Image: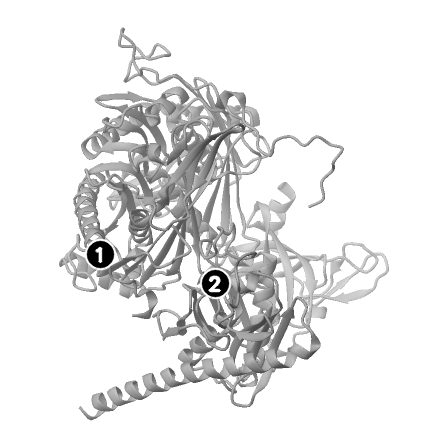
C-alpha cells in the first residue's frame, strides 16, 4: 500500500482510531429461536453469527464419542458475499478448515467438557461480513452463544488481534492492516485468570517487539471482555427483574 | 382369451363389495378394486365359497421383500456370542433378487433355556438356516428368530467341508469324519424339502 | 428440510382445524405471517437484503462482476444463484448436508428468473458482444421456519432492488476499448425489478389451499404447487412438489389463489422497499 | 502456479462453434398453418414404446417420440446399504442423464444442474404412483438416459420410467403418462420439438406475455396430476387451459402404454413356454 500510511504522523490509523483503540463492538444474544444458544456480534465491519446446538446425542457414528468428556464439533463458514471478492465456496477450503480446528481447540480449553461425557456439542460460526479479525470475532461471538446456551465454562474466552506498525503496537486490526505486510498476532485468552488458550503469529517480528504487542493485545482482550461482560450482566439483571415482576404478579 | 386377462397397474377390476375382495397384486380405493401390478387377472372363490377373491399374478417371480412373520432362508455369515449375522436369500419359496441382511439374536435362537444358549453351539458361518422374520429391525438388518422346532440349521457344513446329517435336535454328524458338531437343527417340513428340490 | 416430527394425532388436529378454517396460528388460508424486510446490511456487497418471515431467516448478498458475454446471447447480462444452508439453521446442514435443499431452491429461482422480462437483462450488458455484468446472487439460509422458497424469493427481489451497479466509463485505446469501473460509491445505477417474480407456494392441506405454511403445516401437506408470480400476475415458473398428487380443478384453483396472493405481495414489497429507501434509515440488522 | 512455458496453453474456456451461429427467431407455424416438421399445432408425434430392453435390469423401457429417444432401467427393490439413507418407508431414486451426444451442444458426463432438476421432477411425477409402503426398508432405483433429445424429453422420460416400473413388477397405484406443450401468444403447440422449445423461451420482444412451455404428468385411472412444471412467462388462464390440454393428450397416449405392457407380458410368456 504505497502512499497509504497505516499510521499517520499524528498517530491515527487509516480508520481514524488510535493505536490502542478497539473498533466498535455491538452484539445481541439469542438471535435465533431454534438454536440452543446463538449470538450476533459486530466488531467494526466484521459481522459474525454463532449458533450452539447441544449437548445432544452423538450424530452419525457412535465411534466419535469420547467416553470421559464432551465432543466439541465446530464449523466455521463464511458467506460467499462476505469478502471483498466473492468467495466460491462458503466452507471446505483450507483456510476455513484451519479456522474450524482453531475454534475447536480454543473451546476445548474453556468448556467444562468432563461434565458431559459421551455427548456432543455443536458450535457453528457464520461470517456475514469480513473486515479483518475473523477469528477474534468468531471466538467472541461463540463465547456469547455458549453463554446464551448455558454451557458451563471456566471463563469467557476473548480473542483479539494486534500488529506492530511504525514502532507502535496496534490492537484489533482491520482487513487493510491485516493484508498490508506487518506481523499479525492473534490471541485468545481467559481474561480473569490471564491465561492464553490460543496464540498465533504470522510474518516476521523482532523479538524485542513481541512482548509490547502481546501486552497491547492482552489489554485489548480485557477491554473487549469488559464490554461484553457489562452488557451480558445488564441483560441478565433486566431479565431477572422482569421475571421477578412476572413471578410476583 | 389370454390377452383380455392381462391387466396393467391402475386398471379397475371390480367393485369392492361384500361379494368381492381384493387379493395379491390389487388395492382398493373409493369402493373399487384396482390392479397394482402387470399380470394376469384371476378370480377365485374363497375357501368358504361366500366371496370371490380377485388377485393379479405376475406369472413370474414376484418382487418380494421380507416382511414380518415370513419364513426365510438365510446364510450365516458371522457368529459372535450375542448374535449371528446372516444374509437372507429367499422368502418362502421365492428367491430374492438381492440379499438382505438379517440378524438372529441369542435370545431368539430357541424357545426354552434361552439364557443358556451358546451361539457357537447353534450356528456356524456358512450354514443355511430357516428362520422367521420377527421384526423389520433397524437400519442395519431384519431381526430373525429360530425358536421353533421347524426352524434352525437346515444345511450345516462340517469342518471337513461336508454337508452334515442331523442326528438330534442339537447335533449334526459329519458323514466323512463321523465327528459330531452342535447345531440348532431344524426339523425341516417335508413339503418344504420338496419345493427346495423343485427350485 | 429440517426435521419436524409430528404424531398422527397432531396432524389430524391441524387437518381438522383447517376444515373449520382455522390455522394453527389463527390465520386465514391466504394470509402471510409477519415479515420483516431490510436492505443494505452488508457493505461488502453491491446489494443485500434480509428477510425474516416468522422464524425463517434469509440473508441475500449480490455482488457484480464484469465478465465476457455468453456468445449465444451477446446483448444481455447474466445472473447466477447460489444458496448456502448455514449450519446455524440446523445441525443437519453441517458439511454438505444442505446441498440437496440448496440445489432445489436455486433450480426454482433460476427457472423463475429465466424469462427475459424478469429483470432488465439488456441493461446489464456493458459492451455488446464483449463485456457484461454477472450478478452473483448469494443466498444464506440462517434459520428455517417454513415457506423457504417464498422467503428466499422475496429476499432476492429486495436485494436486487437494493443493488447498486457501479457505472462504467469506456475509453477507446489503441489496444481496444478500455473499461473503467467507477469506485465512487455514489456513482451507480439501479436495476429495474418491477418484473421480478416472487415465488408463491400453495400447499394442499386436506381440501384447502394454504399459502405461507409453517413447518408443521408443511409436514401435513402431501402436495404443493410453487409458482413464480410477477406483479402483472403472470407465471414465470411452476413446479409441483411433494409425494401426493393433485386433481386438475384444484390445480387451477391453486394457480388462481397464488396469482392473487403473488400480485398483492409484489405490490406490498415494492411499496415497503420504496418507503424504506425514502426514510434513509440505518439498517439495524441482527441487533434488534 | 507453475506453468509449462514450452507448451502453448489454449484458452481457458472454449465454446462450441454452434454458440456463435445465432439462431434467427423462427415462426412456430408457417403460412400453411403447419409447424416446422409439418405437424398441425395440436398434433402429437408418433410414439414407439417397448418394455424389457435391458436384460440385466429388473424392468426397463424404451421410448421413441420421433427423434427423442429415451431408455430407462429399474433396479430393486433392494436393501438400503447406507445407514444415513435409511427410512422405514420405501424409497424411490431417480437419475436423469442426457448422454453426452444427445443434444445439439455436447453434454458433460457429470450431472449438471438441469439434469438434477429433471431428476427431481421425474421423481415427483413417479412417487405418487408407486405403492412405496409395500417396500419397507428398501429402495427402488430408476435410471433414465436420454439417447437423443428432440424436445419433450421429460415427458418421454416419465412415460418410459412408468413403463419400466410396471414391467419390473413393482406395485403401483397407476401408470404415469406425461405430455408437454409450448405456448407463444395465443398459439399453443403440443409435443414441441427442441427447436420449438427453444424458440418460445428466447422470446424476441418484451411485450409478449405468453411464451413458455409446460409439462404435466398424469395418473389416468385416479384422474390426478402427479407433476406439473412450467417455464417462461405465461398468463394464469393460459396455464390452466394448457394443463387441461396436456391431460387430454395424456389420455390419448394411455392405450399405447397399456398395449406396450400387454405385449411385453405376452412376449415373456412366449419366451418361457
Q: Residue furthest bottom?
A: A248
- The answer to which quarter of the image holds residue D179 is top left
- The answer to which quarter of the image holds residue C166 is top left
The span from disc 2 to disc 1 (Cα, nearest Å) is 27 Å
Position of residue B84 measured from the top left corner of the image (x, y, whole percent): 65, 65
Residue in the image at 40% along x and 34% along y: C126
For the residues beneath circles 2 and 1, the answer to whether they share a chain is no
Position of residue A65 measured from the top left corner of the image (x, y, whole percent): 59, 74
Q: Is residue B158 above or below residue A16?
A: above
Residue in the image at 69% along x and 62% along y: B78
Location of mark 1 (residue): C276
Q: Is residue A145 above or below residue D125?
A: below
Looking at the rendered structure, the secondary structure element under dot 1 is helix
- Is residue C8 shown left or right of residue A45? left
Location of mark 2 (residue): A131
- Is residue B162 shown left or right of residue C125? right
Please rate how many residues cluster around mark 2, counting C-alpha atoms within 10 Å: few if below 14, some from 14 to 19, many from 20.
many
Residue C186 in sight: yes
Residue D217 in sight: no
Position of residue D271 measured from the top left corner of the image (x, y, whole percent): 56, 25
Please rate how many residues cluster around mark 1, counting C-alpha atoms within 10 Å: few if below 14, some from 14 to 19, many from 20.
some
Q: Residue furthest front?
A: A9
Amino acid at each position: 500500500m504505497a502512499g497509504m500510511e497505516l499510521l499517520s504522523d499524528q498517530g491515527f490509523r487509516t480508520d481514524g482510531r488510535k493505536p490502542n483503540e478497539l473498533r466498535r463492538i455491538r452484539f445481541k444474544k439469542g438471535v435465533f429461536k431454534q438454536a440452543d444458544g446463538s449470538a450476533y456480534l459486530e466488531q467494526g465491519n466484521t459481522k459474525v453469527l454463532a449458533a450452539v446446538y447441544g449437548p445432544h446425542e452423538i450424530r452419525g457414528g457412535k465411534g466419535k464419542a469420547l467416553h470421559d468428556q464432551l465432543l466439541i464439533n465446530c464449523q466455521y463458514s463464511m458467506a460467499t458475499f462476505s469478502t471483498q471478492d466473492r468467495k466460491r465456496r462458503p466452507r471446505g477450503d483450507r483456510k476455513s478448515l484451519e479456522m474450524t480446528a482453531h475454534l475447536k481447540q480454543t473451546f476445548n480449553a474453556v468448556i467444562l467438557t468432563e461434565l458431559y461425557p459421551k455427548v456432543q456439542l455443536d458450535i457453528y460460526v457464520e461470517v456475514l461480513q469480513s473486515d479483518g479479525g475473523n477469528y477474534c470475532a468468531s471466538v467472541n461471538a461463540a463465547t456469547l452463544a455458549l453463554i446464551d446456551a448455558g454451557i458451563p465454562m471456566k471463563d469467557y474466552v476473548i480473542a483479539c488481534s494486534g500488529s506492530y506498525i511504525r514502532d507502535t503496537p496496534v490492537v484489533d486490526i482491520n482487513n487493510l492492516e491485516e493484508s498490508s505486510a506487518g506481523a499479525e498476532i492473534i490471541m485468545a485468552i481467559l481474561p480473569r485468570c490471564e491465561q492464553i488458550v490460543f496464540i498465533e503469529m504470522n510474518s516476521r517480528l523482532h523479538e524485542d517487539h513481541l512482548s509490547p504487542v502481546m501486552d497491547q493485545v492482552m489489554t485489548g482482550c480485557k477491554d473487549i471482555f469488559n464490554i461484553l461482560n457489562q452488557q451480558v450482566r445488564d441483560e441478565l439483571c433486566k431479565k431477572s427483574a422482569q421475571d421477578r415482576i412476572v413471578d410476583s404478579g | 382369451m389370454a390377452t383380455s386377462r392381462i391387466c396393467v397397474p391402475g386398471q379397475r377390476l371390480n367393485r369392492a363389495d361384500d361379494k368381492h375382495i381384493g387379493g395379491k397384486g390389487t388395492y382398493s380405493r373409493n369402493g373399487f378394486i384396482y390392479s397394482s401390478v402387470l399380470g394376469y387377472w384371476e378370480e377365485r372363490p374363497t375357501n368358504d365359497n361366500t366371496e370371490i377373491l380377485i388377485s393379479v399374478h405376475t406369472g413370474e417371480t414376484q418382487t418380494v421383500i421380507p416382511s414380518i412373520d415370513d419364513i426365510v432362508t438365510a446364510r450365516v455369515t458371522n457368529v459372535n456370542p450375542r448374535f449371528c449375522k446372516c444374509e437372507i436369500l429367499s422368502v418362502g419359496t421365492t428367491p430374492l433378487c438381492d440379499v438382505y441382511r438379517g440378524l438372529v439374536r441369542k435370545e431368539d435362537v430357541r424357545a426354552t433355556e434361552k439364557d443358556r444358549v451358546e451361539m457357537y453351539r447353534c450356528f456356524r458361518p456358512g450354514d443355511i438356516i430357516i428362520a422367521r422374520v420377527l421384526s423389520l429391525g433397524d437400519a442395519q438388518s431384519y431381526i430373525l428368530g429360530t425358536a421353533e422346532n421347524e426352524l434352525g440349521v437346515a444345511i450345516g457344513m462340517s469342518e471337513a467341508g461336508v454337508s452334515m446329517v442331523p442326528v438330534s435336535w442339537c447335533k449334526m454328524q459329519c458323514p466323512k469324519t463321523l465327528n459330531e458338531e452342535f447345531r440348532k437343527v431344524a426339523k425341516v417340513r417335508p413339503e418344504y424339502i420338496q419345493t427346495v428340490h423343485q427350485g | 428440510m429440517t426435521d419436524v416430527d409430528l404424531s398422527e394425532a397432531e396432524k389430524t388436529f391441524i387437518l381438522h382445524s383447517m376444515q373449520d378454517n382455522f390455522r394453527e396460528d389463527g390465520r386465514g388460508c391466504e394470509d402471510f405471517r409477519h415479515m420483516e424486510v431490510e436492505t443494505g446490511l452488508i457493505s461488502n456487497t453491491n446489494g443485500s437484503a434480509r428477510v425474516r418471515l416468522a422464524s425463517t431467516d434469509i440473508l441475500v448478498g449480490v455482488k457484480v462482476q464484469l465478465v465476457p458475454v455468453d456468445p449465444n446471447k451477446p446483448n444481455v447480462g447474466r445472473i447466477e444463484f447460489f444458496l448456502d444452508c448455514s449450519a446455524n439453521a440446523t445441525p443437519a446442514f453441517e458439511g454438505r448436508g444442505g446441498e440437496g435443499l440448496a440445489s432445489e431452491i436455486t433450480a426454482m429461482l433460476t427457472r423463475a428468473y429465466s424469462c427475459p422480462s424478469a429483470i432488465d437483462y439488456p441493461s446489464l450488458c456493458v459492451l455488446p458482444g464483449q463485456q457484461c455484468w454477472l450478478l452473483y446472487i448469494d443466498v444464506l439460509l440462517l434459520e428455517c421456519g417454513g415457506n423457504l422458497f417464498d422467503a428466499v424469493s422475496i429476499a432476492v427481489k429486495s436485494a436486487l432492488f437494493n443493488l447498486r451497479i457501479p457505472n462504467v466509463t469506456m475509453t477507446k485505446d489503441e489496444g481496444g476499448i478500455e473499461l473503467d469501473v467507477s469506485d465512487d460509491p455514489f456513482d451507480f445505477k439501479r436495476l429495474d425489478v418491477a418484473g421480478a417474480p416472487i415465488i408463491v407456494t400453495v400447499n394442499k392441506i386436506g381440501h384447502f389451499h394454504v399459502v405461507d405454511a409453517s413447518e408443521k403445516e408443511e409436514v401435513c401437506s402431501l402436495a404443493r404447487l410453487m409458482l413464480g408470480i410477477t406483479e402483472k400476475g403472470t407465471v414465470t415458473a411452476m413446479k409441483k412438489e411433494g409425494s401426493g398428487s393433485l386433481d386438475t380443478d384444484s390445480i387451477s384453483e391453486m394457480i388462481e389463489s397464488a396469482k392473487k396472493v403473488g400480485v398483492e405481495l409484489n405490490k406490498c414489497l415494492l411499496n415497503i422497499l420504496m418507503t424504506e429507501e425514502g426514510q434513509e434509515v440505518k439498517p439495524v440488522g441482527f441487533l434488534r | 502456479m507453475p506453468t509449462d512455458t514450452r507448451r502453448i496453453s489454449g484458452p481457458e474456456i472454449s465454446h462450441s462453434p454452434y454458440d456463435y451461429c445465432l439462431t434467427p427467431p423462427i415462426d412456430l407455424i408457417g403460412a400453411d398453418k403447419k409447424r416446422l416438421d409439418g405437424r398441425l399445432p395440436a398434433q402429437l408425434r408418433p410414439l414407439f414404446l417397448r418394455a424389457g430392453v435391458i436384460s440385466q435390469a429388473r424392468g426397463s423401457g424404451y421410448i421413441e417420440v420421433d427423434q427423442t429417444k429415451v431408455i430407462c432401467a429399474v433396479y430393486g427393490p433392494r436393501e438400503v446399504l447406507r445407514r444415513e439413507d435409511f427410512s422405514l418407508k420405501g424409497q424411490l431414486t431417480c437419475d436423469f442423464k442426457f448422454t453426452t451426444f444427445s443434444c445439439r451442444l455436447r453434454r458433460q458426463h457429470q450431472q449438471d444442474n438441469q439434469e438434477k432438476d429433471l431428476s427431481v421432477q421425474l421423481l415427483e411425477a413417479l412417487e405418487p404412483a408407486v405403492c412405496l409402503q409395500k417396500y419397507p426398508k428398501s429402495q427402488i432405483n430408476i435410471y433414465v438416459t436420454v439417447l437423443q433429445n428432440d424436445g419433450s424429453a421429460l415427458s418421454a422420460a416419465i412415460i418410459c420410467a412408468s413403463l419400466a416400473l410396471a414391467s419390473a413388477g413393482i406395485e403401483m397405484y397407476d401408470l404415469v403418462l406425461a405430455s408437454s406443450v409450448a405456448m407463444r401468444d395465443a398459439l399453443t403447440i403440443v409435443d414441441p420439438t427442441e427447436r420449438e422449445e427453444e424458440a418460445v423461451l428466447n422470446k424476441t420482444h418484451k411485450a409478449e406475455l405468453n411464451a413458455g412451455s409446460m409439462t404435466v404428468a398424469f395418473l389416468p385411472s385416479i384422474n390426478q396430476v402427479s407433476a406439473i412444471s412450467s417455464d417462461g412467462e405465461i398468463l394464469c388462464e393460459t396455464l390452466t387451459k394448457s394443463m387441461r390440454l396436456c391431460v387430454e393428450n395424456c389420455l390419448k397416449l394411455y392405450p399405447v402404454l397399456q398395449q406396450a405392457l400387454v405385449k411385453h407380458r405376452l412376449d415373456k410368456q412366449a419366451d418361457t413356454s
